[in-house]
Image (tube, rainbow, N blue to C red):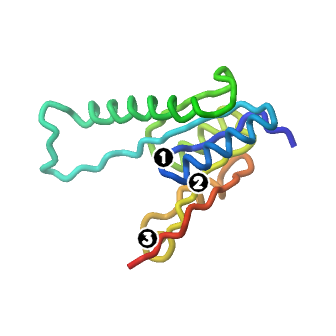
Amino acid sequence: MKWDKIMCPVDFSKVSMEALKLTGELAEKFGSGVIAVHVLEPILAPTDFSFGPLSMTDVEDKLAERAQEGLEQAVASLNVPREKIEIFVARGIGSQEIISIATKNKADLIVMGTHGYTGLTHALLGSTAERVVRKAPCPVLTVKGKEKIED
């Protein structure tokens, strides 16, 4: 199996950064390109939420700008030529955007962290990694985070 493009969704958590490191190691070993992705989920605000002069679009634009900068810094530590790295900051539902970007960019493998939520937290939040594994157009390698202990 040849992996020309390895995609890694990054939410800047410890486990997603471990997944990015593994992505870089695999890309270096196989001469692959890297697709680093961050998805900004929609901001839901209470009715009395106020940012003063900033609109929600302004806030989302600033978050996208920070995500872009964060991804640039994160991929700089990889031992992969910069011309073989693509960065995407998308807006939408995490799993849907990850699958869409993987499909459009013909990713051969997705390496992603899973936070290890269990019980009620997993039932309420669901798992982006789980949804990606089910619907991805290519194999998915998950990097498991330590299980969260519930109270």
Residue positioned 57% across, 44% down in the render: 9
Pick the quarter of the image with the C terminus.
Answer: bottom left
SS state under label 1: loop
- Binning the other alpha carbons within 10 Å of mark 1 as few (below 14), some (14 to 19) or many (20 upward) gives some
Q: Residue furthest top?
A: 83
Pick the quarter of the image with the N terminus.
Answer: top right
Task: Tell me the amino acid under the disc marked 2.
Answer: Gly
* Distance of label 2 from label 3 (alpha carbons): 17 Å
Please state the total of marks drawn on the protein image.
3
- The answer to which image quadrant residue 87 occupies is top right
Q: Could you say where residue 14 lies in the image, as x and y percent from the top left?
A: 51, 52
- Binning the other alpha carbons within 10 Å of mark 3 as few (below 14), some (14 to 19) or many (20 upward) gives few
Residue positioned 66% across, 56% down in the render: 142
SS state under label 3: helix
Q: Which residue is mark 1?
A: 11
Q: Which one is in front in this view, the residue at disc 1 or the one at disc 3?
A: 1
- The answer to which image quadrant residue 50 occupies is top left
* Distance of label 1 from label 2 (alpha carbons): 9 Å
Q: Residue furthest right?
A: 1
In the rendered structure, are the residues bearing label 1 and label 3 in contact, judged by CB atoms less than 8 Å apart? no
Q: Could you say where residue 73 lies in the image, as x and y percent from the top left?
A: 50, 31
Task: Tell me the amino acid under the disc marked 3.
Answer: Thr
Q: Could you say where residue 66 lies in the image, as x and y percent from the top left?
A: 39, 32
**Of residues 22 and 58, the one drawn nearer to the viewer in this rendering:** 22
Q: Earlier in the sequence, mark 1 or mark 2?
A: 1
Q: Which residue is mark 3?
A: 121
> In this picture, is 148 found above or below 7?
below
**Of residues 105 and 121, the one drawn nearer to the viewer in this rendering:** 121
